[in-house]
Amino acid sequence: MDYEHDPPYFLSRFWEGNEVPDFYKLAKYEIEKNGHISIDCDDESVNIYQPVLAYIFSVSRVSVRNMDAMEDIQIDGLPYLKTFIHGYNEGVGYFENDFKALYSSSNIDKLVAAIKSNYYDTRFEKEGKIGWEKVKKFFPVNLNHKTIREEGYFSGIVSRVEDIVSKHPQLFKGFYDRQTKKDIRYWLTGFGNEDIPTSTTVDYEKLKDIIVENGHFIANTKTDRVKIYSPKLAFILCSDALPSTNMDTNTQTNINGNDYLQSYVEGYNEGIKYFDSKYSKDDVRDIHINYFHSGYEGDRGWNIVKTENITFLVITHKGVKKVGYYAGIVNQVEIIRKEYPDAFKDFDKCDHELNPNPIKKKRSISAPVIGLFCNLVNESQLLPKDENESAESYCRKVCLKFKLNYTDRVRQNFLTSNTPSNRLKVKNQIINLIKDKSGQTLSEFIDKKYPPKQNLYA
């Protein structure tokens, strides 16, 4: 097949707006239930493992972006379905020819092992170490006939594998069980402060343009649709052959960035759940503090994932999942801001901008007093400290919220300065200056937990 005139289309816009098409929902349901959805065309039936592809193949007008012309257009999905079927039949033919000796008693164990090895860990051209099963996890970011034919090819192979495994459960016992792999650290060679390695499948500059224009790039997996805010990370997760160094063995290799996308998705979904369980439209200032200042490891905000301040010189699943976690939180912040624009009208402004003439304190407040104040804020549950949060991170957050000066001595006095004299200073120097109801809450908490001693001789 001639791919000379086969422009790439980005699937990040495969539907317009935020409404998910009904057929996509149906395809997703069928794939989650049965592992695939079958589509018929020209008296042929093929198994499709991605709801996105099933949707594209089923409609005559698909919204995409032409990455050569950098313009949004609509294309017909039917020609791509025919290309998919062409590749699908080639994949079926390959499997039937290369594994036709499966039932030979002398080769059966070797062939079963070979099928499992190929299913999970085959090297295809420049794609790094991946397997046939990749069609069940990811679909190509760039839509063109060449990539669709490849998707069809491996889908045809997978369909034959799954058919044989289901027909011979004892022979393939444990086939879908995989031992957890070590999270190897890879040094991405070619990545510097401004250096981006070239890729045969991903154009970094075009990716960057999309993120500059939209604020994010959409990545799709079998079951999820997530936002990526960093051009470098988007490039990594979309690239199929990243030159790298295995830091355990100090050997050169290529890794498939797609393999890390699922870790990003897992973190992303965890971040969404965390935000939804802890914040509402009534927590604007707390969200502001965490978003801009201290939500990421105490000294930086959640929005760090929208900058290039996170380096990706060394990649691990754990690290990618962490970035995904904060990206999920940032996504929820964007959603809640759109839902409640009035409540978040001053969200981007810091307290010193909202109140340019704050009340000047007559004297500086000592670190032991501020440290005790942070402790009492936690004990009163006014701003609970997370279970795994460090004292430094928590004290920074409290000081930022109440406009107090943080130093390392504040952290040192977090648990060691609870004396009657310091409690009195906390009330006089800090709590009495708090004008909202949190000041009254703290004052009542201190009076209840540390009531003044009664004078027995009065």
Image: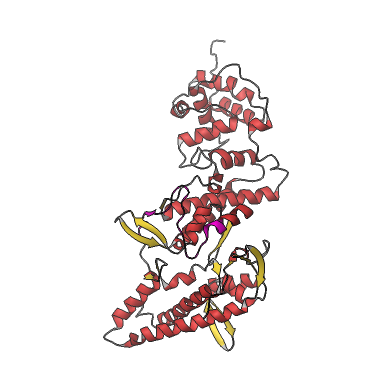
Q: Residue at x 65, y 51 (%)?
A: 335
Answer with the quarter of the image where residue 416 lies.
top left
Count all numbered tags in the image, as a single digit.
Answer: 0
| Residue 324 pos. (x, y %) | 51, 53
The answer to whether residue 176 shows anywhere in this view is no
Q: Residue at x 60, y 16 (%)?
A: 362
Quadrant of the frame with the C terminus:
top right
Foreground residue among 191 and 14? 191
Residue found at the far top of this picture: 458
Foreground residue among 440 and 343? 343
| Residue 250 pos. (x, y %) | 30, 55
The vertical placement of 413 against 270, above or below, is above
- The prevailing secondary structure element of the residues shown in magenta is loop
Residue found at the far left of this picture: 106
| Residue 18 pos. (x, y %) | 67, 61
| Residue 307 pos. (x, y %) | 54, 46
Foreground residue among 33 and 163? 163
Q: Residue at x 34, y 85 (%)?
A: 102
Foreground residue among 334 and 456? 334
Which contiguous range is marked in magenta? 181-207
Q: Residue at x 52, y 83 (%)?
A: 86
Q: Is residue 178 left or right of residue 46?
A: left
Q: Is residue 352 left or right of residue 421?
A: right
